[in-house]
Image: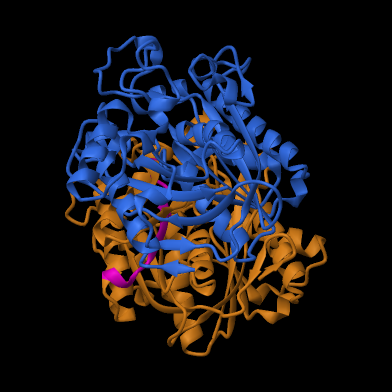
Chain colours: A blue, B orange
């Protein structure tokens, strides 16, 4: 099971038997719009607050995942979830609705793969028959909490990123039809002293590189083992930095093979999203919606999703701290 | 491994090979003061902010736990940690200092046993050789974030609780000398519609009862199997409610056998702590400091720690939501 310091190789690779992806209008109008299960035409989703809208999306994603897995709620042994809102209330309220035993997790935008890695571990070791991983983010809840309320109309530098409005959930089972989770590598904190919350891609790039290198080394795999290695939300500033660092470290990843969910989810030239997408839902919706469809159709056979997270808080920033970052990687194979 | 819906019975019960507990002055002056590894005489710990003081305590607790386990930092495969501060920054910065691969978790005050249960699972299944569970809370960081800055001098009703200033960490290993973790039961959200953040004991009591009943049912154990069943932080209002609910549900737990970390940590008659202690560090320091000492000395043989958590946020309260609660139970045996 454990290889190296921090990689799990699943002897019995668990199966993703159902996923659900729900997004807002900007993601629906993006290049992957057709790959999501549910696209909401406006960001309020007829809810009285942004937070209630985010929670509803996560509940919907969970419902869709269960429905595709043809399972009732009471079959889920553990719901592993988290999100960006203080005290991860979206996930907690979604867990209340689901009624499943609940393991709350937090890895900022890396929560998508942290939760999937843990769900896979639970199933693979027999600690669960069925586990669900879920996460969400909402542009307006994130702006309000981490930056300024949207209504202030504050300007952003081009290095800033645009939080994806959406939710993704995946049901993991010991057996069934679907892609298999073959391994996972847990990230460690990488903090190179960067402090600019409007440039989180640069801060997170070294964490992605560290996890990719650890994953390849501990699994004994070449980068060529994967048809695609996709980072979570490094976007147009951070992703080239990660590519450059990998090159400098002698890790041969072809340009066509290395992508980023924050670059895939929007048409950056056309949509006003600065450097690209971010948020827990960025890697969750792109992986569970778009990339697993490409796996199912045979366009991809082996995928490594490296979800990145900037673990700062407004308070840690105000107290002059740098931005600690992390990346968790999960390999999904056909 | 999995019994019932949500209990793990560890076939190879992992061992707690080292713990570290650090507290502030109020806890040091309480009845358990002599059981903690490090008592700070003031709450600032010579740090420029309460948050930095909290983080330092968690770093110290981790160091002490490592030292008692006679392990260097690089032996720890995974640090499983979380705390009450937004985006769990205490744990993240402590993980940065530790340098270990990091799984951030959040279960409010139940984080203590959520992290210990996961650390035990990792080790028991061979997913880790060594895992560390850690958590912290600080009275002033919690007051500032969840209620009012202490300097406002706001009054509190007697049902309110006093957040423990402290940190606890435990190193879990496959083999070694120390108490063994034999099982864990993961909580589900219980929300009976209570909305008063100054009476979280009442809100959390049903979650403790639900988890205790699930644990006993799924393990097939009688309450008498345990020398002590101890809840996390129900304190003087919530704990009698839990006792009463158990009685009504026909679960025979003797009064002498059922206790609460929030009642143990302070002398409620003498110290100004309203209903008693709360916070992630309440159950962590009492379990790792006091109760494991009683296990080691043979005063206790079998212990069930049921850490309770109120998963509200100031925002969810302001938006009129009730308080979702959870409790995670871990059994520790000599």
Magenta stretch contains residue B74: yes
As drawn, is A126 to the left or to the right of A226? right
Counting the numbered discs, the total is: 0
Res B266 visible: no
Q: Is residue B278 above or below residue A134?
A: below
Q: Which residue is more in the foreground, A325 or A5? A: A5
Q: Is residue B112 left or right of residue B236?
A: left
Q: Give the range drawn in magenta.
A: B73-86
x 53%, y 74%: residue = B124
What residue is rendered at 33% in x and 73% in y? B65
What residue is at 60 percent from the left and 66 percent from the top? A125
Location of residue B253 in the rendering, given as x and y in whole percent from the top left corner? 72, 72
Task: Residue B62: give x, y in percent of width and height.
Answer: 31, 67
Q: Is residue B262 above or below residue A55?
A: below
- Residue A271 location in percent, x, y? 40, 12
Picture coordinates of residue B288 (x, y %)?
Answer: 43, 72
Task: Name above or below for residue B321 compared with residue A112.
Answer: above
Rendered image quadrant of residue A273 = top left
Residue at the outermost bottom position? B298
Residue under the image location 51 percent in, 14 percent down: A29
Left or right: where does residue B298 sit relative to residue A70? left
Question: Magenta includes B100?
Answer: no
Can the viewer see residue B255 in this picture?
A: yes
The quarter holding residue B301 reads: bottom right
Taking depth in this image into account, of B84 and A214 the one nearest to the observer is A214
């Amino acid at each position: 099971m454990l290889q190296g310091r921090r990689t799990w190789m699943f002897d019995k690779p668990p199966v993703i038997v159902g996923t659900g992806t729900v997004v807002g209008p900007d993601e629906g109008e993006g290049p992957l719009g057709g790959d999501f299960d549910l696209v909401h035409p406006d960001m309020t989703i007829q809810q009285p607050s942004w937070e209630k809208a985010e929670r509803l999306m996560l509940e919907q994603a969970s419902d869709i995942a269960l429905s595709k897995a043809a399972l009732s709620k009471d079959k889920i042994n553990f719901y592993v979830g988290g999100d960006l809102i203080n005290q991860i209330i979206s996930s907690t309220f979604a867990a209340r609705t689901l009624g499943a035993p609940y393991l709350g997790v937090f890895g900022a935008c890396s929560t998508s793969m942290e939760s999937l890695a843990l769900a896979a571990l639970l199933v693979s070791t027999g600690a669960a028959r069925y586990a669900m991983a879920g996460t969400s983010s909402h542009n307006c809840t994130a702006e309000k909490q981490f930056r300024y309320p949207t209504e202030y109309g504050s300007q952003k530098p081009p290095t800033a990123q645009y939080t994806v409005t959406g939710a993704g959930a995946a049901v993991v089972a010991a057996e069934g039809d679907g892609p298999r989770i073959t391994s996972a590598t847990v990230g460690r904190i990488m903090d190179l002293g960067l402090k600019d919350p409007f440039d989180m891609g640069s801060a997170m790039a070294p964490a992605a590189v560290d996890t990719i290198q650890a994953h390849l080394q501990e699994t004994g795999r070449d980068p060529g083992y994967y048809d695609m290695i996709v980072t979570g939300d490094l976007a147009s500033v951070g992703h080239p930095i990660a590519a450059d660092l990998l090159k400098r470290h002698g890790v041969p990843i072809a340009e066509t093979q290395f992508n980023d969910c924050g670059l895939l989810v929007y048409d950056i030239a056309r949509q006003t999203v600065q450097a690209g997408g971010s948020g827990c839902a960025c890697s969750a919706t792109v992986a569970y919606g778009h990339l697993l469809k490409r796996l199912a159709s045979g366009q991809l056979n082996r995928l490594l999703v490296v979800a990145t997270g900037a673990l700062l808080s407004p308070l840690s920033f105000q107290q002059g701290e740098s931005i600690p970052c992390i990346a968790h990687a999960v390999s999904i194979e056909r």
